[in-house]
Image (cartoon, helix red, strand yellow):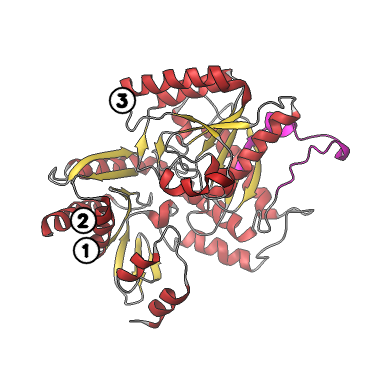
């Protein structure tokens, strides 16, 4: 066993990992380098990064434009605080994001950027802003939130409170606040969506006056296994919430920056959000960076003399980190220089065709929106056999990295992955499923 593998087993506590199973799987796969859409391990073996390094990588690893921007920033300053100071790169990025949001979500007025460092933090910020906003405009009875069933918004306590995946969240129930749960469909089926909307209408009629906001993962509930709903469903739901006086929070952490085929998923919906949480692809998958974008209407409720205590008392040590902001600015440059969004349809079609070509023997269904996809495995084995995990491990032997969510194998390539590479990732998942389920 390589020394780094031994040290990992001795000292690293991995996220979302049962370490008895981690150790039983054998020596861990240790990544040493990367190039384009491939990861390279300590033995020099290459793997297609089929989940974009947990949905973060956009333009590929070691992109020369982003690499150069970070190197150049190192010659200036690596970090300075935004508490009592401004920072040139954070200022530039905030203005750039305001213009980007106005272009893609016109009329929303999302002109104010609050920096943090993870998707969970961006959601936490949004929840606190929405709550404090309602308090400061006199809606003091609005102290709770509504969220979709099976939602996932991160792992800090506020974001866990609006999350709805029992496997992840149930143990923390004594620590978190109650959330009104709105049912969401598994797939964009009109009848199922109509039923969910009827139940949402009843819930808002009963509890709407006590709710501060509604948070949604627009169009795709990623961690729930790529559950999807239609733009029409979301538009109707958000319209009802707005009529009931709720602040609308769009969690674009996973869906933003081209993942659904448009820069933001909310572009495909007529209703505009009041707050948008962004992270993951914001920095191109390079450095931890998150932003909560707020409308000017929301921001104005926090103005006033210091003695009125309307300040938003929240902050992070590395808020607006210059290195991360430089990476984000370069990521946005690449979107423009390489016309990334215009190239997406070809890649989305390649993913759709590859999913359609999967044999039905071991594949129950496929779910896709843009370059976000879930392959649902078909079997009657008990959950303890961890079929999804075994399929993902088998894919590694064919040079492909994917991750399962239970029996749903997630495929979320970087936007830069070629159609041929996308087809290979999907084909390997199909081959690995057959190997696991036929080989036992």
**Residue 19 appears left or right of 421:** right
- Residue 249: x, y in percent? 56, 34
Q: Looking at the image, can residue 248 be seen?
A: no
Residue 100: mark in rendering: none
Residue 3 painted magenta: no
- Residue 137: x, y in percent? 74, 26
Label 1: which secondary element: loop
Q: Residue at x 82, y 39 (%)?
A: 309
Mark sitting earlier along the chain (3/1): 3
Q: 64 or 399, which is in the foreground?
A: 399
Q: Are marks 2 and 1 in contact (CB under 8 Å)?
A: yes
Q: Nearer the viewer, mark 2 or mark 3?
A: 3
Q: 283 or 169, which is in the foreground?
A: 169
Q: Are marks 2 and 3 in contact (CB under 8 Å)?
A: no
- Residue 392: x, y in percent? 27, 58
Q: 78 or 195, which is in the foreground?
A: 195
Label 3: which secondary element: loop
Residue, far front: 174
Q: Which residues are magenta?
A: 292-314
Residue 398: mark in rendering: 1
Label 2: which secondary element: helix
**Residue 138 appears left or right of 190:** right
Check the image and report above or below for 123 versus 35: above
Q: Residue at x 22, y 63 (%)?
A: 398
- Residue 159: x, y in percent? 55, 44
Q: Which residue is mark 2?
A: 428
- Image quarter where the N terminus lies is bottom left
Q: Which residue is mark 3?
A: 189
Q: Residues within 10 Å of mark 2 (few under 14, many from 20)?
A: many
Q: CA distance from mark 2 to mark 1?
A: 7 Å
Quadrant assignment, res 48: bottom left
Q: Residues within 10 Å of mark 1 (few under 14, many from 20)?
A: some
């Amino acid at each position: 066993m390589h020394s780094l593998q031994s040290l990992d087993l001795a000292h690293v506590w991995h996220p979302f990992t049962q370490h008895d199973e981690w150790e039983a799987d054998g020596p861990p796969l240790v990544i040493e380098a990367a190039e384009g859409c491939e990861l390279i391990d300590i033995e020099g073996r290459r793997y297609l990064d089929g989940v974009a390094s947990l949905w973060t990588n956009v333009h590929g690893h070691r992109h020369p434009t982003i690499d150069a921007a970070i190197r150049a920033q190192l010659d200036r300053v690596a970090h300075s605080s935004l508490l009592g100071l401004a920072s040139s790169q954070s200022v530039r990025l905030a203005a750039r994001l305001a213009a980007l949001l106005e272009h893609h979500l016109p009329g929303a007025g999302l002109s104010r950027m609050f920096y943090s460092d993870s998707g969970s933090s961006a959601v936490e910020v949004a929840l606190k802003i929405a709550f404090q906003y309602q308090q400061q405009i006199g809606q003091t009875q609005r102290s709770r939130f509504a969220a979709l069933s099976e939602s996932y918004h991160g792992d800090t306590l506020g974001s866990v409170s609006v999350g709805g995946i029992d496997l992840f969240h149930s143990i923390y129930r004594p620590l978190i606040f109650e959330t009104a749960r709105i049912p969401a469909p598994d797939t964009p089926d009109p009848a199922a969506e109509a039923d969910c909307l009827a139940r949402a209408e009843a819930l808002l009629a009963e509890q709407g006056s006590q709710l501060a906001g509604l948070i949604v993962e627009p169009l795709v509930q990623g961690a729930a296994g790529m559950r999807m709903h239609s733009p029409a469903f979301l538009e109707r739901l958000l319209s009802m919430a707005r009529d009931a006086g709720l602040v609308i929070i769009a969690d674009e952490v996973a869906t933003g920056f081209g993942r659904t085929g448009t820069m933001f998923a909310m572009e495909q919906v007529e209703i505009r959000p009041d707050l948008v949480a962004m992270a993951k692809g914001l920095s191109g998958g390079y450095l931890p960076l998150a932003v909560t974008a707020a409308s000017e209407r929301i921001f104005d409720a926090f103005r006033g003399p210091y003695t009125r205590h309307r300040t938003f008392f929240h902050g992070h040590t590395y808020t607006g980190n210059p290195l991360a902001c430089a990476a984000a600015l370069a990521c946005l440059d690449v979107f423009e220089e390489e016309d990334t969004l215009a190239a997406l349809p070809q890649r989305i079609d390649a993913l759709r065709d590859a999913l359609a070509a999967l044999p039905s023997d071991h594949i129950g269904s496929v779910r896709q929106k843009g370059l976000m996809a879930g392959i649902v495995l078909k079997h009657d084995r008990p959950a303890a056999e961890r079929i999804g995990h075994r399929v993902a491990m088998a894919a590694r032997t064919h040079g492909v990295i994917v991750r399962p969510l239970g029996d749903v194998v997630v495929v979320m390539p970087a936007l830069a992955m070629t159609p041929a590479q996308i087809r290979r990732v999907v084909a390997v998942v199909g081959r690995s499923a057959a190997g696991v389920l036929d080989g036992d």
